[in-house]
Image (spheres, rainbow, N blue to C red):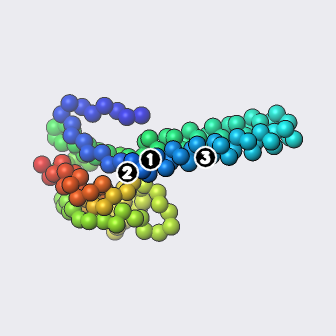
C-alpha cells in the first residue's frame, strides 16, 4: 500500500519499464489459462479437494504476479526537518538522516544484477558492495551513509539518476 508523502517531502520513484510490467501481466493471464484447465481435469478424477486446491493455487499465483507487476518499484524520499531519507523497495525499507550521507556518485550501469538471482534487492548495507536496489535501468546512484553503509539505486536513465543525486545532496 502506498503511503502519501508529507507536503514537505520530495520523492524519486523508479519503476520498471512499461514493457516489463506488461510482460508480467501477460504471464498472469498465461498462468491462469494453463493452470485452471489442468486443475479442473485433475479435479474430475480426484474429487472436489483438487478443485479447491487448484483454484486456490491459481488464485495465489495470479494475485502475487499482479502485485509484483504493480508494486515493483523503488522509492527514495527526503522529508522532515532535520531531513530524513527513506529508501523502500519490495520487502525492503531503510531510513537515515540526510546529514549522514557522506558520498553520492552517479554513473552508467548495465542494469543487471551479479549472480544468478535477479531479485530487486541484493546484499547488505554493511557489506563492501552494499545493498543494490534494482528494477532495471541504465544508470545508478551509489551513496555512502556514515562510515559503514552503502546503497546503490539503479535508475531508469542518467537524468533520473541526477535527479535522485540532487535530492540527496540539497
Horizontal side of residue 26 vs 41, given as left or right: left
**Callout 2 environment at 10 Å: few (<14), some (14 to 19), or many (20+)?**
few
**Callout 3 environment at 10 Å: few (<14), some (14 to 19), or many (20+)?**
few
Q: Earlier in the sequence, mark 3 or mark 1?
A: 1
The residue beneath circle 3 is 30
Q: Residue at x 49, y 50 (%)?
A: 23
The residue beneath circle 1 is 21
**Callout 1 environment at 10 Å: few (<14), some (14 to 19), or many (20+)?**
some
Tell me the tag on residue 17. Answer: 2
Q: Residue at x 68, y 46 (%)?
A: 34
Nearer to the camera, 151 or 108? 108
Horizontal side of residue 52 vs 69, given as left or right: right
Helix, strand or loop at mark 2: loop
Can residue 27 be seen here? The reply is yes
For the residues labelled 1 and 2, say whether their Cβ atoms are less than 8 Å apart.
yes
Q: Residue at x 22, y 47 (%)?
A: 97
Helix, strand or loop at mark 3: helix
Q: Residue at x 25, y 42 (%)?
A: 11
Helix, strand or loop at mark 1: helix
Asked if 30 appears above or below 44 in the picture, the reply is: below
Cα separation between marks 2 and 3: 20 Å
Q: Earlier in the sequence, mark 2 or mark 3?
A: 2
Amino acid at each position: 500500500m502506498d503511503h502519501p508523502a508529507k507536503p514537505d517531502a520530495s520523492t524519486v520513484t523508479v519503476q520498471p519499464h512499461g514493457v516489463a510490467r506488461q510482460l508480467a501481466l501477460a504471464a498472469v493471464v498465461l498462468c491462469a489459462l494453463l493452470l485452471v484447465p489442468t486443475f479442473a481435469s485433475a479435479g474430475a478424477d480426484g474429487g472436489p479437494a483438487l478443485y479447491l486446491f487448484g483454484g486456490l493455487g491459481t488464485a495465489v499465483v495470479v494475485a502475487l504476479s499482479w502485485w509484483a507487476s504493480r508494486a515493483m518499484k523503488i522509492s527514495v524520499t527526503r522529508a522532515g526537518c532535520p531531513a530524513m531519507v527513506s529508501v523502500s523497495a519490495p520487502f525492503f525499507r531503510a531510513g537515515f538522516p540526510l546529514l549522514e550521507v557522506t558520498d553520492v556518485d552517479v554513473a552508467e550501469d548495465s542494469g543487471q544484477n551479479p549472480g544468478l538471482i535477479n531479485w530487486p534487492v541484493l546484499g547488505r548495507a554493511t557489506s563492501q558492495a552494499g545493498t543494490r536496489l534494482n528494477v532495471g535501468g541504465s544508470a545508478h546512484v551509489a551513496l555512502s551513509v556514515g562510515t559503514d553503509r552503502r546503497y546503490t539505486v539503479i535508475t531508469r536513465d542518467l537524468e533520473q539518476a541526477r535527479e535522485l543525486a540532487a535530492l540527496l545532496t540539497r
